[in-house]
Amino acid sequence: MRAKEWQRGLLIGILLLVAFWLLSLIMGLAGKTHIAVSQANQVRQQYDSLEARKASLEANLASLGTARGHDAAIRTAFGVARPGEEVIVVVPPVAATATPELSWWQKVLNWF
């Protein structure tokens, strides 16, 4: 009877070790899955950003294909103008300064 109990105890111990080993494998897989999903999301965001940049560059390339777009790019990059064109400088309006209120004795002195 004692040998059977010892065998059962050994079997339970082995099964517990196998269960802990399987649990550690599952936890490792869960961690790797989490890392893979977060990296996939980062790659998706980078891909979307690159697609938006590609669309912007294609639009710029299409505008540069026209004579007007080519002219505008040269004017912007090098600050050049056609013969006969003049520079227009827009100056913001000067803010009106408020005149300070005169005290009663200044008003009396100004009256004389």
Image (spheres, helix red, strand yellow):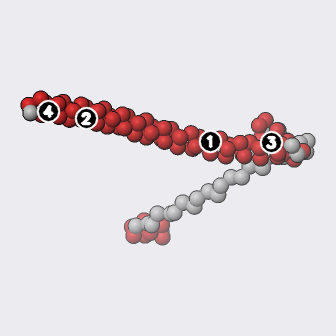
Which label sits on residue 61?
3
Which label sits on residue 89?
none
The answer to which of marks 1 and 4 sits earlier in the sequence is: 4
Query: Please, which residue is most extreme toward the left here?
Result: 2
Q: CA distance from mark 2 to mark 4?
A: 16 Å
Q: CA distance from mark 1 to mark 4?
A: 63 Å
Amino acid type of the residue tagged 4 in the rendering: Lys
Within-10-Å neighbours for mark 1: few <14, some 14–19, many 20+: few
Q: Which residue is mark 1?
A: 47
| Camera-side residue of 44 and 53 | 44
Q: Residue at x 17, y 34 (%)?
A: 8
Q: Nearer the viewer, mark 4 or mark 3?
A: 4
SS assignment at label 3 = helix
| Location of residue 8 with respect to 107 vertically, above or below | above
Is there any visible trace of residue 97 in the rendered image? Answer: yes
In the displayed structure image, the side of residue 56 where residue 38 appears, left or right: left
| Camera-side residue of 92 and 51 | 51
Q: Which residue is mark 2?
A: 15
Q: CA distance from mark 4 to mark 3?
A: 84 Å
Check if mark 2's residue and mark 3's residue have beta carbons within 8 Å.
Answer: no
Q: CA distance from mark 2 to mark 1?
A: 47 Å
Within-10-Å neighbours for mark 4: few <14, some 14–19, many 20+: few
Q: Nearer the viewer, mark 2 or mark 3?
A: 2
The answer to which of marks 3 and 1 sits earlier in the sequence is: 1
The answer to which of marks 2 and 3 sits earlier in the sequence is: 2
Q: Which residue is mark 4?
A: 4
